[in-house]
Amino acid sequence: MPATARIAPRGEDRLRSGHPWIYRTDVRDVDAGAGAVVRVVGPKDRPLGFALYSDRSQIALRMIARADGTIDDAFWERRLRAAIAFRTALGLDATAYRLVHGEADLLPSLIVDRYADCLVLQALSQGMDRLLPTLVPMLVELTGARGVLARNDPKVRLLEGLEQKVEPLHGDVPPTIAVREGPVHYDVDVWHGQKTGLFLDQRENREAAARYARGRVLDGFSYNGGFALRLASAADTVEALDSSADAVARITHNAAKNRLANVTAREANVFDELRHLEREGARFDTIVLDPPAFAKNKASVPKALAGYKEINLRALRLLNPGGYLVTCSCSYNVDEATFGQVLYEASVDSHTPVTVVEKRMQGRDHPVLLGVPETYYLKCFILRTLA
C-alpha cells in the first residue's frame, strides 16, 4: 500500500481546479521516500488520488490519478499506449515528433520524442526518474525503437536533486539521426542539440508560415534552420541568422542536404543585425523571429518584454508593404495577451499598421492541458504589414 500524503485545504482546492501540482507549502504531512508513488488525501482524509512525491522540489506532489485504483505496471502501460495512439491518429507527415508530453498526457514530468527509429526522453522529476527502469522496456515494446537515449541534462533536474546526464538506456542511438518533416530532411544530433535535438513544437508553425512566405526571407534565431529550410521553396532567397557557429554549420549542412541553393546562413547577434540591416535600408518580404525564451522566470519578464518589442519593432521596419512577420515567444511567463500587446506597441512605435493573419501555438503533438497554463508556452503570431 503506498504511503499517504495529506494536503492542506488550499492544495485540495488547487486539485479541484484541475491543476496536477501540489506545492510543498500545501503538504501537511508525508512519510515517503524520494520519487515514491503516494496516496493523496485531503485535510479530512478524503481520498483524492495518487501522486509522484519529491522530497526536494517545491512541487512536492504531481498527480497521476484522481481516483482509487492500483498504480502498477499495467497502469503505466495504459498511459503510454494512449499517448502513442493519439500521435498515431494525428497522421503527422514527419518521422520526428513528440510521443509523450508530460502533464498533458497524464504522465507528469516525462518527455518522450521520436526520431525515426530512436526515442529521446527526459525524466524531470524524482518520480519519473525512478520509474525509468519500468517505462523504458514498455516504450521499446510499444514503438519498436532500436535505441533510447536519456537527455537528462535540463537544469530543472537540479531542483529535484537529480544529476544532469546524457546516457543511452537501450540499444543503439547513433551520433546523427536522419529525419523528415514534410518535404524537409534533417540530420539531427540528439546527443548534444537543443532540447532533444530539434524544436519539434514548431513543426506545424513552419508549415503555416510556408503558406505565406515569398520573396526575400530573413530567419532570425534560426538554430537548425527549421523555418529557413521550410520556407525556401516559396522564397527567392532566405538568409538565416544565429549567434552560434555550430548552428550556422548545421543550417548550411541541412540546406545542402535538401539541395536548397537559395539558403545562406550567417553567424550574427540578431539584435545587432536587425539594427544594422535597418541602417542599410534593407527590405524583406518575410521575416521570422523565433528567439529562445527571454523570460526564464517572473523576475525577468520586464526585460524580456523590452527584448521582444525591440526585435519586432526592427523587423516591422524592415518589411515591405504586404510583407509577413512570423513571430514567436516560447516564454511561459509571457502569456498570449501580453505578447500580443507587445506586438501592438511595436506596430505603433514603428508606424507600421499590421493585421493578425493567424494566432498559433505549439504543434498538436504538444497538447495543452486546460487548467494547466504551464503547458501553454509557445505563442506564434503571423502578421501582415499594411504600409
Image (spheres, grey):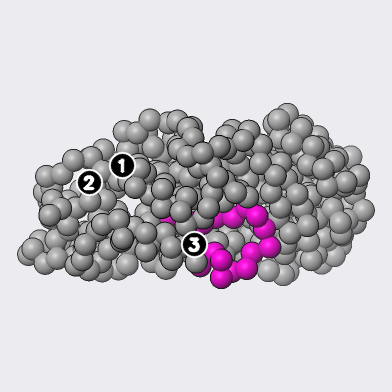
Q: Is residue 132 left or right of residue 218?
A: left
Magenta residues, as a range?
Answer: 86-103
- Residue with the mark numbered 2: 36
Give the mark, 1 or 2, whose residue is nearer the N terminus: 2
Disc 1 marks a residue whose amino acid type is Arg
Q: Residue at x 83, y 47 (%)?
A: 258
| Mark 2 or mark 3, earlier in chain | 2
358 shown above or below 183? below
Is 372 displayed left or right of 228 in the figure? left
Tell me where residue 282 appears, x and y as whole percent: 89, 45
Q: Are marks 1 and 2 in contact (CB under 8 Å)?
A: yes
Label 2 and label 3: CA atoms lie apart by 25 Å
In 3D space, how far apart are the residues under numbered discs 3 and 1 (Cα atoms)? 21 Å
The residue tagged 3 is: 84
Residue in the picture at 38% in, 49% down: 135
Residue 376, percent from left and from top: 49, 60
Foreground mark, 2 or 3, reads 3
- Residue most toward the left? 44
* Dot 1 alpha-carbon crowd within 10 angstroms: few under 14, some 14 to 19, many 20 or more: some
Tell me the distance, in whole angstroms, between the alpha carbons under discs 1 and 2.
8 Å
Q: Which residue is mark 1?
A: 130
Residue 207: assigned label: none
Local SS, label 1: helix
User: Label 2's element?
Assistant: loop
Residue at 51%, 39% (x, y): give it: 171
The kind of residue on which mark 3 rests is Ile
Q: Mark 3 or 1 closer to N-term? A: 3
